[in-house]
Image (tube, rainbow, N blue to C red):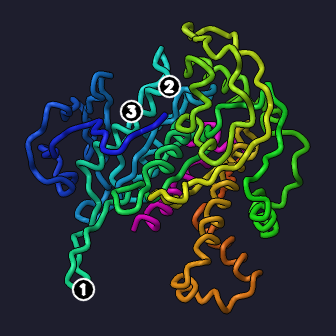
Amino acid sequence: MVRGRGRGLVGVGHLMWRNNPALGYLLPSRSWSCYSTVVERANTERGSQEVHVNCRSNGHIKLNIHAPLIAGQSSPVILYLPTGPVGTASASIDDDQVIAALSAASNATIVRINYRLGKGLRYPTPIHDVLAGFDWVKENLSTAKPSATHRGRSIRSMSRYGVCGQLVGGSLATMLALTESRLGESRIAAAAVSNPIVDWVFPENTEETETTSMDDSFERSYNSMKAMATRSKKAKKLSSSWETYKDEQSLSSESLLSARRQFFRKPASYFDSFASPILFFRSPGADVPRDENVFHEDEGDDNDVSSTTARRKAYKAFPPTASSLILPEMRISIGEETPLYDQGEELVKLLRRSIIRIREGRAGNQAMLDRFEEEELDETRKKGRALEEAEQRIEFHMPGRISIWGSPSEPQWRNDVMEVGAWFRRVLG
């Protein structure tokens, strides 16, 4: 899936909040265009508005915008992407409770993007919805500070946003963070995800394959720094988390496979990097099944596609060297006993690996050497500093056994979300 620049998915004028002064400071008053409307709900909670955003010829989505609890202060804007219909636990999850905890800890403007998925709606619809929602936010909710001057030249400030989600919402949040963070533009600067589904190419029909690097010398250097060892001091599991925790009641391997059958019309769709964002960093490690033209029209269809053929996984350089993309700061929470643990841990490794690669690539720039005084450091200290930077920018947390936000069976989820809110407040300023 290729997303072009200057696509203009949503064309809207600025919104004038008619009954909510707490939100009004964000937006200048201007007339609306025909592409969006504000909807006043009958029992709208204090400080909340609902906006409809048209997605061109593909219907519309709803955005719920929650004002910060303390008005009159500069506050960040955080996009919240709902959990999605995955696993038995999702039926009891109250995303509004998660938003309330996030708001209390961050004092941010929270924008819930109600992407469409399930009940006959499949990928790439949720991808397009999230991108359209973000376009609307960039157009209407600016967090940019007033322009400053430097040596007589005006320096324009760009907006920096956060994005947050778990499970399907975590997958979409990861996608948005990796593709909408460009230097010189309003961008995603921070992402917090919990149990994100970042690889829909599940290992149910393939054996785990070794990953091969495009740069073996770099890989040896990376491994020597122990940057791959993200798991605490626990003994390494003998089998994959997919197999070990396949029968976990709230989030089983079978429930994830069932969701995949409902969400994708054909296998090629989940081999796409926008759907499985871990594939920005490596190849799938499997071929698309031969019967890729099989469409799943019946939501109750339990017939999955034929087994995938295992392949060696090859690393990719992401962000691309010549790209203006940069990696935002990320906070990744993963339940210790879920089928998704391994892919979440791998995402942390790949993100940190990318940061170290970029830092080592800067080592040839004399200005950077002077700035960090790295010419006086020996190789070990250089590697240690690179690893420290990677671990600071990509945080990894294991807050509990399953750790699904909003789940009544694990009330400690609230502590993790409160920590996420405090993290956003620190990173986004």
Q: Give, as a three-letter code, the residue at label 3.
A: Asp
Q: Residue at x 82, y 32 (%)?
A: 243
Q: Residue furthest bottom?
A: 376
- Cβ atoms under marks 2 and 1 closer than 8 Å: no
Residue 238 locus on image (x, y percent): 91, 43
Position of residue 362 relative to residue 421, above or below, is below
From the viewer's perspective, is 284 left or right of 74? Answer: right
- Cβ atoms under marks 3 and 2 closer than 8 Å: no
SS of the residue at dot 1?
A: loop
Find disc 1 in the rendering and name its residue. 151
Pick whichever of labels 3 and 1 is earlier in the sequence. Answer: 3
- Say the numbered circle drawn on residue 129: 3
Image quadrant assignment for residue 393? bottom right
SS of the residue at dot 2?
A: loop
Q: Nearer the viewer, residue 407 or 153?
A: 153
Q: Give, as a three-letter code, the residue at label 1.
A: Arg
Give me the C-alpha separation between circle 3 and circle 1. 42 Å
Indicate which label's residue lies in the foreground, 2 or 1: 1
Pick whichever of labels 2 and 1 is earlier in the sequence. Answer: 2
Q: Residue at x 49, y 33 (%)?
A: 1
Q: Nearer the viewer, residue 373 or 418?
A: 373
Residue numbers of the magenta segment: 401-429
Find disc 2 in the rendering and name its residue. 123
